[in-house]
Amino acid sequence: MAVRGRPALMAGLMGAAVVGPALASVGLSAVGDRIEILRPQADGVAAFLVRTPHDPTFALDAADAERAHASTLVLDYPDVRPAERPGGSDAITTAAFERQLAMLAQAGFGPGGAPLEIRFPRATTGVWRYAEPVLSRYGLTATTTSAREPGAPSGYLLNGRELAALHLGSGWAVSDTPLPRPSGPAVNRVAVGPGDDERSLFGRIVAGLPAPAPAESGPMLPGSWTPTAGNALRTSDEGLRLRTATPGGSTSRLWAGRAGAWSDYAVSLTWSLSRTATGAVVLRDGSTEPLRVVLGQGAVRVVDVRERTLAVLGIDGRGRHALDARLAGDRLEITVDGAHAVVPVARPDSGGALALRVDGAPGTELLVRRLQVT
């Protein structure tokens, strides 16, 4: 995302004139019942680019706002077209696009707020004719590509002259290769589709924000977990219950796909299992080197991603058990019911949080009575 450098195009927007050369900074200001995107001028007078009604629905709480500022929101759009001129089944309407940009401004993304990058992996004619004017009103540019799409209909993609105008005249970034999928612990990528309105998009953005630090991750809160197989994790007076409803077992992940910054942390928990069940705590889940701590009826095993058993610690087959594990680079210290082991482990290329799994006949469960992450 970049601030536009064509102040003449902003004149007259919403009744506000833009006079004089624009500075490089743009800010957000909440005034009464509206959000104003401001462009400070060299003479100290701020000109309005956009005024939009303030909707508290799209306000990030303090924790989410902090994580939004510490990451980059990347929105990939397929195409933008007026409703009366559809460009394909995946096109976003111009009206919906405008409402989504207003939502982003209200949520604090973009100029003067949390980092935002808008991308169009296909440089369609709709990008130039319909998306660019709307983006300009919000002081935004975007990124697209000059790479040709095999089989694209004539006139569907921008030609070289139009791409040059988009780059030189509008300040867009134009890549000569297809846009890669962004990745990294500080990237929150959302592929926007025609089914997204401003509210659903806001929800997807919040759901994709990076996980909080381990000590603030709320592992005993069911809402921090994502069910990926079988039934969801449930809470009770005793703790967290993961029950299997199918022979395939059940898995829930803490901050699934959002804990790329996690690497070294400690986990402490107590657990009990149904008599015929097997459980697992997955450390660095989602990384290149996850570690499964398999909770059996008579032993606990540490297993790496290559299915190699790295350590075995014996336990009594009944009752409640305690597990403490600490990850530090290529070292895992683990204590189970007082038995201790130090295990060499592979260092991952990226981080990952936790997963819980239970296997067994339908109805068997893993009960986690206490879980702390630091």
Image (cartoon, helix red, strand yellow):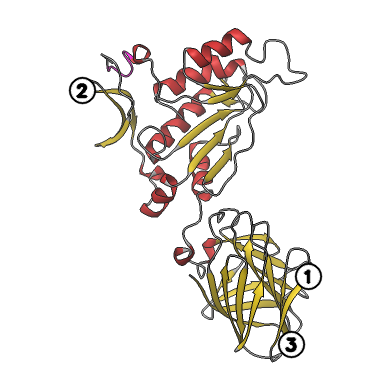
Where does label 2 land, which residue? 45
Q: Magenta segment, principal secondary structure? A: loop
Observer-nearest residue: 101 or 188? 188
Q: From the top left corner, tell me how far across and down residue 180 is, in percent.
A: 64, 34
Badge 2 amino acid: Val
Q: From the top left corner, tell me how far across and down residue 76 is, in percent.
A: 58, 33
Whether residue 198 can be seen here: yes
Observer-nearest residue: 115 or 15? 115
Give the magenta part as a residue range. Answer: 11-16
Label 1 vs 3, first from the N-terminus? 3
Badge 3 amino acid: Gly
Q: Quadrant of residue 119?
A: top right
Of the numbered discs in the image, which one, if any, rests on residue 298? 3
What is the distance, in whole Å, between disc 1 and disc 3 at their CAs? 19 Å
SS at badge 2: loop
Label 1 neighbour load within 10 Å: few <14, some 14-19, many 20+: few
Residue at 62% x, 13% y: name it.
158
Of the numbered discs in the image, which one, if any, rests on residue 336? none
Q: Is 13 part of what is drawn in magenta?
A: yes
Label 2 vs 3, first from the N-terminus? 2
Where does label 1 land, which residue? 308
Label 2 vs 1, first from the N-terminus? 2
137 displayed left or right of 17: right
Mark 1 or 3, which is nearer the eye?
Answer: 1
Badge 1 amino acid: Arg
Q: Is residue 245 above or below residue 182?
A: below
Q: From the top left corner, tell me how far across and down residue 244 is, in percent.
A: 71, 71
Label 2 neighbour load within 10 Å: few <14, some 14-19, many 20+: few
SS at badge 1: loop
